[in-house]
Image (cartoon, coloured by chain):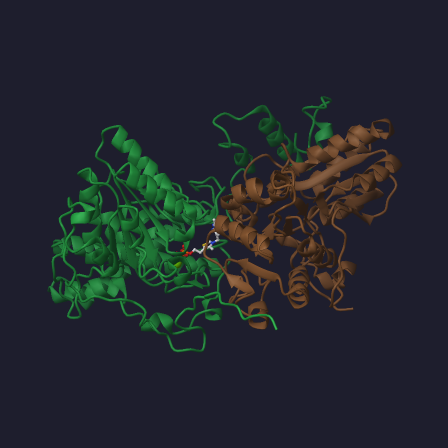
Chain colours: A brown, B green
Amino acid sequence: MPQMNMVQAIHSAMDVMLERDRSVVLLGEDIGYFGGVFRATEGLQRKYGEHRVLDTPIAEGGIIAAAIGMGVNGLRPVTEIQFADYIYPAYDQIVSELARLRYRSAGDFTAPVTIRTPCGGGIRGGQTHSQSPEAIFAHVCGLKVVMPSNPYDAKGLLIAAIEDNDPVIFLEPKRLYNGPFDGQPDKPAVPWTAHAKGEVPEGYYRLPIGECAIAREGSELTIVTYGTMVHVAEGAAQAAGIDAEIIDVRTISPLDTATIIASVKKTGRCVVVHEATRFGGFGGELAATIQEECFWHLEAPIVRVGGWDTPYPHAFEWEYFPGQTRVANALKRVMGEAA
Amino acid sequence: MPRPSRLHIPHPSARPGEAPDFSYLRLSAAGAVARPEPSARLEAMSPSAADLATQLVRVLDDDHRAVGPWNPHLEPAELQVGLRHMLLTRLFDERMQKTQRQGRISFYVKCTGEEAVSVAAAMALEPHDMLFPGYRNQGLQVVRGQPLVALMNQLLSNTGDMCKGRQLPVMYHGSDARLFSISGNLATQFPQAVGWAMAAAIKGEDHIAASWIGEGSSAEADFHHALLFASTYRAPCILNVVNNQWAISTFQGFAAGESPSFAARGPGYGIPGLRVDGNDFLAVHAATRWAAERARKGHGATLIELVTYRVAAHSTSDDPARYRPRDEAEQWPLGCPLERLRQHLCALGEWDDARHAALTAELEQQVNAAWKTACTFGTMTEGPKLDPGLMFEDVYETLPPHLARQREALRAELAGATAAALSGNVTQNTGTGA
Ligand SMILES: Cc1ncc(C[n+]2csc(CCOP(=O)(O)OP(=O)(O)O)c2C)c(N)n1
Ligand SMILES: [Mg+2]
């Protein structure tokens, strides 16, 4: 099977969908002739034409608003917001319009818009190229929110997102584009070719939106996480010598609570991990759900791990990032070890 | 058969492998555009507001003389200061680009070819006027006297960093120098400058505000917010669009649409628009003076389009050979702003090659010395490091309890201890971020 990194897998998903469905169009800043600042759309304009892969003015609000209009008029727009940190000029169009169009018109109008955007830190991007804004979209009813952690999932989920008739925010952890980063910046980079999920079928396939994956089976404790932190959690559990079950949430909304609940009932212990700031983060929703459903099975309080509650600081990227030490500390605490 | 698309797709005049073509640029001869009274009402302007916004204000002619009604008649000494600031800006840029290539700083943005846009404008304003820069306006920092060491420390995120390690390189600020904090989010500063100017008017002061954005960024809604608020309240401000033809890979036509000029956006909002040769130091100075006088006398805002060219890559992360002809910069019809001012001074008999060489050597020396000093505050790879605990400060005016706990947790994490070992109190005991 072909090997792909995450950018290639995302590229392949769009390539497949442009080929299969004439109503699919791509729009975003620098995505056409140039192929995108992360090269996710490289060559697609040449292949499918300027009328299906559109460079846009620098206006995120305009991009999403236009995509809504296109979606209403029978197209299936896939938008790129160059960095998740730049999505806010479009926030009103996303929250007040895109998310609620079906509801307010009782299904008379819908817009099947996909919003792809690179998120997360670890590339020395400072506070305006590092944010993880999933919680502020998870809180909005009517949006689906997806964050894959590997090339295989990225392609299958992006195809599902494009085919979905509801709007999907598709967050791409940019630190994972080239390899399964485990939180240790000083170690040599590992490419996706060294990872099972770097094997990606050439053609069409889809993975269901709304299902968690069990990234690693284990018995002692459940780590509920997504995106880059799936790989950090794997490293941390291994380093701490804990047989952790790692749940890759993949779809933040709507949430597959059944898989999470079954795992926590099995292990009796849980740590929730994300890169985003902790306060008001999606980890709170996960912890609350687990507490409601698994209280009588828990051997220890659930612990949340996240980025500190500050903007992402340029010079202190790795002190900010919830790396293996922070995760391992939480694992040990939940295991009752004063490590 | 599906019908063919009827959508219009704009195209740049040349892509890689094609011959550069700037025939789309509407140029006027130096001295050809008349200068209305700065107090003139928009409808009563002569030349008309529409003409002002589409012609090109130029002062320096092909023989390096200053001609026409926009000639600001600056003293040679002032022109020499302008040349010095522009040269320093360029040498600073070149040196900082090199340090980025050496891995000493993480990122850099040059303004090569656009030096006059910032330097001439800042020199035409009063020290108390407030500036809201973009990321490619380092000339403003230079003119306003930000020490080179301070700028370099920011680029290095070191122990002398004005941003305390929190910001990407080039996101300077300086309230003493009246330079607003630069944002990575495009166009946000434009309407903020208008608000600052409204406050000045509310307080009865005669200070004005000026802001700069790229032509690509003028596509953002914030650009339109700025023009509307400036128009509605006749805010004393100058709104500059730096049209350097490119926004990363996207040519100016995407933000301009079918409009012949960015300055022409002004009259639609009731604001005069001046289209100015951005590589002509004297034209930029004169246009800024005109707009400043208008604003200070209560006649409101001006939109100035500065026609220039982004000679360098977008940033150190960019490779422009992928999207524009390699030799496009060489074909740029408005030349180099430094060279044009230098030639003008030479024509006046106020400058020569020997003085230029001496100035270059002096400024190179200044940049080198500043870099040496800055490095003593630490670089990415060596020397002293900022205390990571600083990341928790300035989120709020006073450190809230949860951030105080997180700071302790980080210290424990860095010390290799677990939070659990710190205390028995569960709520305070979060190596995990409570
Ligand atoms: C809101 C927002 N959207 C997108 C970006 C990414 N971005 C950074 S610079 C840039 C191009 C800006 O071009 P222009 O305004 O012409 O300024 P120039 O770089 O030419 O000086 C883009 C798209 C951003 N920083 N902020
Ligand atoms: Mg530009």
- Residue B171 place in picture, x, y as percent: 42, 46
- Residue A228 place in picture, x, y as percent: 68, 49
Residue at 58 percent of width and 45 percent of height:
A98
Q: Quadrant of residue B400?
A: top right
Ligand 1 in which quarter: bottom left
Q: Is residue A188 visible?
A: yes
Give the camera-side residue of B237 and B90: B237
- Locate the N terminus of chain A by quadrant: bottom right
Q: Does B8 appear above or below B302?
A: below
- Residue B105 place in picture, x, y as percent: 48, 53
- Residue A85 place in picture, x, y as percent: 54, 46
Residue at 25 percent of width and 50 percent of height:
B121
Residue A168 as seen in the image, left or right of residue B292: right
Q: Quadrant of residue A178?
A: bottom right
Residue B75 as seen in the image, left or right of residue A251: left
Q: Does A73 appear above or below A298?
A: below
Give the camera-side residue of B306 and A169: A169
Residue B313 as seen in the image, left or right of residue A234: left
Residue at 27 percent of width and 57 percent of height:
B116
Q: Is residue B150 visible?
A: no
Give the camera-side residue of A99 and A309: A99
Q: Does B431 appear above or below B121?
A: above
Residue B233 as seen in the image, left or right of residue B15: left
